[in-house]
Image (cartoon, grey):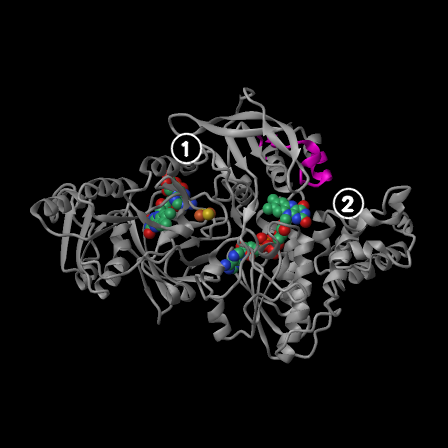
Amino acid sequence: MFRVLGNRKVTPNAHEMIVEAPEVARKAQAGQFALLMVNEHSERIPYTLSDWDKEAGSVTFIVLEVGKSTSDFVRLQPGDEVAHVTGPLGMPLEVDNFGTVALIGGCYGLGGVVPVGRTMKAAGNRVITFVEARMEGMHYYLDKYESFSDEVVQTTTDGSNGIKGHGVDILEARLKEGVQVDRVFAVGCPFMMMITAQLTQPYEIKTFAALNPIMLDGTGMCGACRCTVGEETKFACVDGPFFDAHLVDWHELRDRRAAYIRIERDVCK
Amino acid sequence: MIEAARCLACKKPKCVAGCPVNIDIPSFLHLIEEGKFVEAAQKIKETNPLPAVCGRVCPQEEQCEKVCVLTIKHESVAIGRLERFAADYERNAGKIKLPEIAEKTGKNVAIVGAGPAGLCVAGDLIIAGHEVTVFEALQKPGGVLMYGIPDFRLPEEIINAEVQTLSDLGVNFRYDYVVGRNDTIPEMLAGDFDAVFIGSGAGLPSFQGIPGENLIGVFSANEYLTRANLMKAYRFPEYDTPPIEAGHVTTIGGGNVAMDSARTALRLGSRSTIVYRRAREQMPARDEEIHHAEEEGIKFNLLTNPTKILGNSRREVIGMECIRMELGEPDDSGRRRPVPIEGSEFEIECDAVVVAIGNKPNPLIPQTMEGLELTRWGTVVTEEHTMQTSVEGVYAGGDIVSGAATVISAMGQGKVAARAMDHYLRTGKNPDPPPPPPPPKEKSKKKKE
Ligand SMILES: Cc1cc2nc3c(=O)[nH]c(=O)nc-3n(C[C@H](O)[C@H](O)[C@H](O)COP(=O)(O)OP(=O)(O)OC[C@H]3O[C@@H](n4cnc5c(N)ncnc54)[C@H](O)[C@@H]3O)c2cc1C
Ligand SMILES: Cc1cc2nc3c(=O)[nH]c(=O)nc-3n(C[C@H](O)[C@H](O)[C@H](O)COP(=O)(O)OP(=O)(O)OC[C@H]3O[C@@H](n4cnc5c(N)ncnc54)[C@H](O)[C@@H]3O)c2cc1C
Ligand code: FES
């Protein structure tokens, strides 16, 4: 069993969950995720590793409450246990000194960009972090971003905090100003990652996005997580989750993610 | 007992030779005949640690029962059913007797994968006195026995009971542990472990590469069966994983996996059709399974090859385009090759497609370990007498070595590996190959026999 060590509500619908999982923490690398089952009847649900502490043997997730499994998880309090945590899973991100790296985080990607930024900074990159939220009070990791970023750009859709607009809008403005960006990493909802890819394509900036298809085993055994990347079928759980965003079939990802929406909605009623 | 009494107790029993783990079949049949059921089960367990499983899923008609001398004139003794009976009797009577464990050696063995190959090695090595830890990626043991073969053929309690016996003997099970992502094999050998057995199976599903395979409603058999078996989606919403609701499920393939998928579809309330590109006689599934499928009302579209899966604007499956085939010239394997009949395209309406055309080994372990020699199919190369891989101290068996095969062959290889590993752990050397290798000429002659 894996003990819950912390549960902090960071926005109205997101929680920072800290779970004791020493084997995951020991091996975690930027870009990887873990699968979690709250109890023996739960689904196996993937969450991005937002942080980890090897000494304490703990891992941190940012969990957006969207349905049954995510709400079961965020309902747990410190001292409660989850039945299963498997990880780290997926390919670690390729790390190098690329020059200037732009990170774009939205939704749970506000946590997901943290390890990416840290390793990119450690490899000598200049890091610009764009974090987007709907409104004020939804940016919660400012201190973390500042620890690895040369610049942090906060945006809100309604302009109530930071710059009004989306992360990509501001990135676009910067690119137009002639700011040199050598690599972009996007973590968040498929729509945001798709428009990021569309924006950076004409500038020919290599862009990587963390795909989030529906998963089942997370070990390459089932193929539920198939995505089309550059005309080829890839299994996101073992070949990804990060892929070249310019090659991803985003519409397929969006539709495949909706596969169980009707039946899942019924159960939440 | 009457059935068991039909055994003639041949002097040189062919059935024993026909069994991949050489169960002493005449002796256990004799014990059943005498009404000593628990003893019969224990007799089987001397060589086969999972009789309740094998009694249900072994292709006996290809093995022990095929060579039974009675088949010359009559039907073979129903060895498989009697094996199952003895094992179930022992378990239900609560009389499972733990075997004696040899004096502890202080050596540590890591086993990758809790499928039949891994469980078999775990059982043999714990009895031989070593410390054994099994690392399993999923949340439950059994491998394909748990996530693939459906409950109606192999109930989960049976696997759990077998695993409980191993736990009682002192085998340590670590679930949620993906070797290669958690520790790699080289890290295990550098750490606590003196030897490693790879029993990671052939768990990477193949697809045909036809248009429409990524539509919603197209599943690998692994996904379809895993949702149903491992995650118990058929008990949704008591279990959280959603089931696959479909009016008509079409399964592509002709093996046991296809039969299990098609039969599962029926049980999930769908109409169920199998599409297979060769003829009935060429289906690799066990006869018994094909019979069951037919009796249950599954429709067979033989000599039919899917060419395209059709979808609607929401990218949901609405049908499948197929072409009729006829048998042409024999190919390398001697099977007549199916060739498409031009102009015979037709459509099958369906809202789910299950692809059951085979599995390949998962590349994770070879990717995270240097020097592990592979075949061009991605299976691990081993030395036949010991199942040692190209890396010292690392052994392998089961589907990771032979490609998708059978439970009993996985266990047979596990047995060979366990014997060699025990020797290696005690002496630092592999055992000598049993018979001195015959000169090359005789060898080729022997093969023909
Ligand atoms: C690699 C990866 C990393 C992810 N990281 C995070 C993270 O750090 N934080 C976070 O909040 N979410 C993350 N997600 C998404 C998260 O897994 C889904 O939001 C979650 O499964 C929803 O489950 P539910 O039962 O609460 O909602 P549901 O009502 O089941 O579904 C809501 C939506 O979530 C998606 N979804 C449903 N089941 C799955 C599944 N088994 N696997 C993946 N997606 C599914 C579907 O698009 C669905 O429409 C990640 C997904 C992937 C694949
Ligand atoms: C649907 C279906 C029906 C079948 N029906 C029959 C039948 O009727 N009769 C018969 O004899 N055979 C049948 N087979 C074949 C038989 O099940 C297999 O040949 C047998 O299970 C192989 O055993 P194994 O131990 O090699 O591997 P598996 O059973 O595949 O087990 C491998 C285990 O290793 C785990 N694993 C993989 N990688 C890692 C890793 N990196 N770290 C940790 N764990 C890992 C997997 O999760 C899995 O649990 C069937 C197969 C299927 C799919
Ligand atoms: S989730 Fe099953 S293969 Fe990726």
Give the crowd class for mark 1: few <14, some 14-19, many >=20 residues within 10 Å. Answer: few
Residue drawn where x is 42% and y is 53% of the image? A35
Can residue B272 be seen from the camera position used here?
Answer: no
Please name the residue that numbered disc 1 is placed on.
A262
Chain letter for mark 2: B
Amino acid on which the number 1 mark rests in the picture:
Arg
Give residue B47's quadrant in the image. Answer: bottom right
* Magenta stretch bounds: B268-292
Taking depth in this image into account, of B166 and A182 the one nearest to the observer is: A182
Q: Position of residue A165 (x, y in %)?
A: 14, 42
Taking depth in this image into account, of A179 and B54 the one nearest to the observer is: A179
Residue drawn where x is 66% and y is 75% of the image? B423
Q: Position of residue B263 (x, y in %)?
A: 63, 36
Please name the residue that numbered disc 2 is placed on.
B61
Was residue B69 drawn as part of the magenta stretch in this picture?
no
Q: Are marks 1 and 2 in contact (CB under 8 Å)?
A: no
Give the crowd class for mark 2: few <14, some 14-19, many >=20 residues within 10 Å. Answer: some
Picture disc at residue A35: none
Q: Position of residue B393 (x, y in %)?
A: 57, 71
Give residue B312's quadrant in the image. Answer: top left
